[in-house]
Image: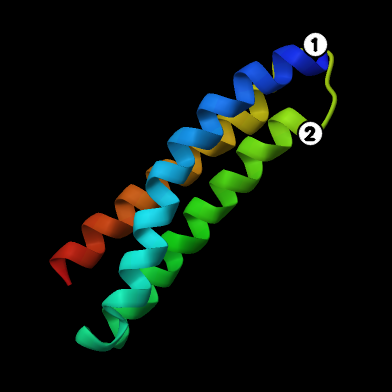
Amino acid sequence: MNARMRWRLAVPLIGLTLLMVVPAVYGTWVFWSDFGNTYRSLSVVICLALLAQLTLAVSIGVRPTRDVPWVRIGLMVVTFLIACGVAAVRRSA
């Protein structure tokens, strides 16, 4: 897979990830003092999972590969599901 194809795949994934990372980090920072320790720690876990997803999205464009990087795309899906699961737990806590 050439560099152009990698970046054509990576740019939408980076954009979608940024749509989740920016509000999560901003909301954690703004509402930090409004909630307790459990909510704060779960918010940090969500931010870390989404930042890991952003790192994976950037790595798709940066690291050369011969085939479609299915493992990294799958890891992005897993980190997204982890963030959603933690958000559901945070909402009920």
Give the x, y percent position of residue 50.
Answer: 48, 52
Q: Taking 18 as reference, is 91 above or below it?
A: below
Q: Amino acid at mark 1?
A: Met
Disc 2 designates what residue? Answer: 62
Label 1, label 2: how many angstroms apart (C-alpha)?
12 Å
Whether the residues at callouts 1 and 2 have beta carbons within 8 Å, the answer is no
Instruction: Report crowding for label 2: few under 14, some 14 to 19, many 20 or more residues within 10 A (C-alpha).
Output: few
Give the x, y percent position of residue 51.
Answer: 55, 54
Disc 1 designates what residue? Answer: 1
Among numbered discs 1 and 2, the one appearing first in the sequence:
1
Q: Taking 30 as reference, is 11 above or below it?
A: above
**Foreground residue among 69 and 13:** 13
Residue name at image x 61 percent, y 36 percent: 57
Q: Taking 82 as reference, is 7 above or below it?
A: above
Q: Is residue 66 left or right of residue 46?
A: right
**Foreground residue among 77 and 33:** 33
